[in-house]
Amino acid sequence: MNSSGGPRNSEPGTLPQLFFGAVGKHDKPDALQHKVNGVYEPISSRALANRVRRVALGLHELGVKAGDRVAIFSENRPEWAITDYACVTSGVTDVPLYPNLPAEQAAYIIRDSGAVAVFVSDEAQAAKIASVRAHCPALREVITYAALPHAGADHTLAELETRGGAVDTEARQAAYRAAADAVKPDDLATLIYTSGTTGEPKGVMLSHDNLYSNVMAAETAVPFEGKDIGLSFLPLSHIFERMAGHYMMFHVGCSIAYAESIDTVPIDMQTVRPTLVLSVPRLYEKMYARVLENALAGGAVKQQIFFWARKVAEQWADEKLAGLEPGGFLAIKYRIAQKLVFSKLQARTGGRLRYFVSGGAPLAAEINKFFYAAGLVILEGYGLTETSPVIAVNTPGAFRLGTVGKALPGVEIAIASDGEILTRGPHVMKGYYNKPDATRDAIDPEGWFHTGDIGEVRDDFLAITDRKKDIIVTAGGKNIAPQPIENMIKTNKYVSQAVVIGDKRKFPVVLVVPNWEQLEKYAKFKNIIWTDRAQLLEMPTIHAKMDKEVRSKLEGLAKFEMPKKIALLEHDFSIERGELTPTLKVKRRIIDKTYRTVIDKLYADEHDGPAIG
């Protein structure tokens, strides 16, 4: 079964074309915004272009040349954007590193890519590099974004810009622009290392045209406009934020405001009042849980109003999604529900939000429908690092819950005989760096990239059912897709994380990390006395409560899909322990190995109640 987004809507192009085109076309006074001493300050398109050129010239003065690799090890900030544009306009390939990576993983990427320089955000990141620098033979320069020199860095960015400014003559400017114009669509723009849910990270080689084509195609589908303000907080090292929240927003003339940190996003939303927000499902899950918590924490009247409003909004949503225009008494009730309940949720986003865009992992349809009913539309899309990234996305004019939308223009989709999603087009990577065998495994001779995801096409809308590698095959031969089950469980306010286990076992089980804030409130309400969380998890009352809450979310599952046992874990899964990727995807093999004793006990105690870990 094939689905195509139609012919490509642009000639092959480059990132320098996008950058210089946007600077010339929009000339915005607030192309970027960042917090300085607690206040957002703008950076104009012209100031940005001047800084990009001087950094590019400074890199050239350090001996960095076209074709070299340069790493960026930093949180989101204007300097990240400046460094990236300086590299891509110079024909330099940049290598983004997630800022939360430990030193050893950063060293692997720097060494594997052969990076000759690395930009770091501060002394803490510089210290990570210093601890492993001896194992990175190609690395010559460490440049810090910090204002003042510090240990572990050879230069500050300001020093690099000053060095570039000293040679910023008309002749050098012309040579820089000529070099940017000489970049070819097939040249390597960036090396992005996959998070590695299985095995070591692989360097995904994305060309200039891979990213250019995806920007141009996505621009026609997703309604980003020059009057928009985007709040940037997903890591720029993540391809979703890089393409949509960096290149595409800049290309169409959006103002990009950088959140101070991931922890300050709720505050920054109130300050920036964005019209566009890109995020992974975890943000929407947390917002949904907080709304339910606030509703249930109120008195009986407040609860009744909330559940009445939700019911009315869902009836309104059902009509809208069926292509109807709700009217009459329903429209009146919906306006009242908006005023009493949902206006408060909208206010928490700043009150001007036009669209959320979700990617990076599946979003539970229940959560998506709730936001839609509340008047906050989440445009869910789908893609991978290897596809630059967007393959398909829901749009305001073609929106269907439970799917990831229609293919972008120029993007082909096919479903293999085993259900795997295949894609072909200008968005598909050049291959994995220094891994020809892995490249051949991923891209077949006809140019189809094998995504590793299972899905189906419904009236041109793509629906994802699971990761091919995640599919659980029980001892009885039954196939179970764990992600939809986990997403259902995580909509419960008492659950923080959930992982379904059961491959080659008699039946599935689930490991659950409680939402401790909620569970401890419940324990206090029940007058349960405990000294630590491990002790609390041993109590039969708590077992029974968590078992009831988890199972309340699992209606409609086939008998063979239903987790037969539940184990409660004290601690959240973490990046540091290798249980999560930097994009917060669960590494199932590691979870299975780390909690093997807990899991084995579930199967050994087949007739007991929930277990603990």
Image (cartoon, rainbow, N blue to C red):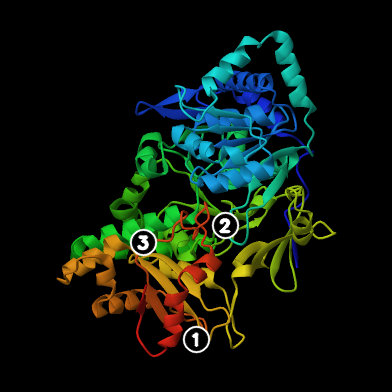
**Label 3 environment density (alpha carbons within 10 Å; few <14, some 14–19, many ≥20):** few
Above or below for 68 versus 111: above
* Residue at the farthest right position: 445
Q: Nearer the viewer, mark 1 or mark 2?
A: 1
Q: Which residue is mark 2?
A: 399
Q: Position of residue 163 (x, y in %)?
A: 60, 15
Q: Which residue is mark 1?
A: 559
Above or below for 362 versus 215: below
Q: CA distance from mark 1 to mark 3?
A: 41 Å
Q: CA distance from mark 3 to mark 2?
A: 25 Å
Above or below for 433 versus 153: below
Q: Report the amino acid beneath label 3.
A: Phe
Identify the element where label 3 is drawn. helix
Q: Residue at x 50, y 27 (%)?
A: 145
Question: If you read the primary sequence from the N terminus, does the residue marked by circle 3 or circle 2 appear first?
Answer: 3
**Label 1 environment density (alpha carbons within 10 Å; few <14, some 14–19, many ≥20):** few
Q: Which residue is mark 3?
A: 329
Can residue 230 be seen from the camera position used here?
no
In this view of the protein, which residue sits in the foreground, 602 or 401? 602
In this view of the protein, which residue sits in the foreground, 488 or 275? 488
Please identify the quarter of the rendering in which residue 9 is found.
top right
Identify the element where label 1 is drawn. loop
